[in-house]
Amino acid sequence: MRQRRLAAPAFHRQRIAAYGEVIAQFAAEITGRWQAGTMDVHPQMLLVALRIVGKCLFNIDAEAEARAIATAVSAFMITPPPGYIPQALIEQLQKLSFGPMLKVQKGIADLDAILYGMIAERRRAPGDRGDLLSMLMESEDTDGTGGMSDKQVRDECLTVMLAGHETTANALSFTLWMLAKHPEIQERVQEEAVRVLGARRPAADDYPKLRLAYMVFAEAMRLYPTVWVLGRSAGPEPYQVRGFTIPAGAMLLAPQIVVHRDARFWKDPEEFRPERFEEEGKGTRPKFAYFPFGGGSRQCIGEALAWMEGVFVLATIARDWRLKPVPGAPEELPMTPSVNLRPKRGVPLVLERR
Ligand code: HEM
């Protein structure tokens, strides 16, 4: 809770509005380099999301480091999800010297080089630069034990970098796939982007006006929630809920991937229909019928940033590019339910410039 309180100012509404500019800039820059033809859009979405988190929260332009970080993150995304494996076992596994664990160790070493480098640079030239890194590094413990150690700052940065980039990138990639599959919806997102933005980049004021882009992103996260299951351990005493006894220490799972497709809450749940976020079930749907960002005391701290990222990146792409499935592509995108739900073999699409 202390770390959340410290980090909170970086996610305030005014800050998110300022991040809008960074999002719009990277979205335009990265998609502006695209060439017509077939391309795997997933690495591109990883790059956009990583550069946005790096610039907004740590004031680094992560393009140079992006590849090392992406490789390291892939190494962490082992199956099955760690939720099913006790923490102590994970820690033991990570120390072993075999195939996937060597990759994890190399990933940790590469990330550490980047993060400790960033921290050392700040220690050399201290001062508030108005980003998350400053908030963490300038903080003082209220009990007078001093600020955070390099290791604590590194842990926080790693959490935010990992939590904040693959999730958003996967959600964007799934949304682009769905748009390619639904050309009539794609055309409407394009019309909206042209009407609201014309030829310029999006700014914070445009966010509420890009309503269809928002609903498309929301609907893609309903069907393909990047965080597809949450795990919690029950407390030390057994307890009763709705006639069930939850044993002490039991592992409880809350699977978005199941609840988001439950016909009790969603009409024709398998259908991709963005408008459902406007009309059907509004106000009557239980709060936890839709929880791509979790809930309660650990609810995603980056939610507002992720929404703005999703909407601005989609509007930029839909305005400038037409997306089509690759001929002979499978009906459903092959996915891997790892720590996050991720594309199994990328997201290849055919791009045409508009
Ligand atoms: C579409 C994008 C995203 C999705 C689907 C997502 C989803 C989630 C979910 C479900 C949780 C709760 C995990 C739990 O309860 O165990 C969470 C936590 C978190 N998210 Fe996100 N997230 C996204 C983007 C971001 C971004 C952009 C950032 C930051 C830049 C971020 C930072 C965090 C952090 C730091 C936590 C841990 C909070 C805590 O434990 O107190 N996330 N996210």
Image: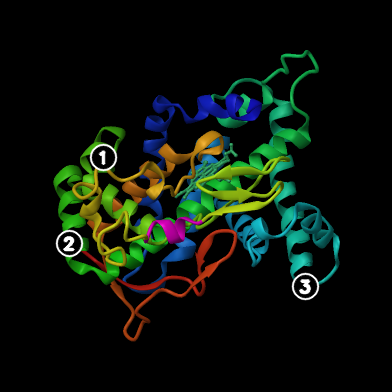
Can you tell me whether the CB of the residue at mark 1 lies under 8 Å from the nearest atom of ligand 1?
no
* Furthest-front residue in this view: 243
Residue 166 x, y percent position in the rendering: 53, 55
Question: Which quarter of the figure is the N terminus placed in?
Answer: top right
Q: Nearer the viewer, residue 252 or 140?
A: 252
Q: What is the CA distance from the residue labelled 2 to the residue labelled 3? A: 46 Å
Q: Is residue 166 magenta?
A: no
Q: Secondary structure at mark 2?
A: helix
**In this figure, which residue is indicated by the disc labeled 2?**
187
Q: Is residue 319 left or right of residue 138?
A: left
Spot occupied by residue 172 in the image (x, y as percentages of width and height): 40, 57
Tell me the magenta residue range: 255-261
Categorize mark 1 by other alpha carbons within 10 Å: few (<14), some (14-19), many (20+). Answer: few
Q: Is residue 354 visible?
A: yes
Residue 192 lies left or right of residue 181; in this view the side is left
Q: Amino acid at mark 3?
A: Gly
Residue 301 visible to the viewer: no
The residue that appears at 32% across and 46% down in the rendered structure is 312
From the viewer's perspective, is the residue at label 1 or at label 3 nearer? 1
Tell me which amino acid carries mark 1. Answer: Gly
Residue marked by disc 3 = 99
Is the residue at mark 3 in contact range of ligand 1, meaning its CB lies under 8 Å from it? no
Q: Residues within 10 Å of mark 3 (few under 14, many from 20)?
A: few
Dots 2 and 3: beta carbons under 8 Å? no
- Circle on res. 283: 1
* Amino acid of disc 2: Glu
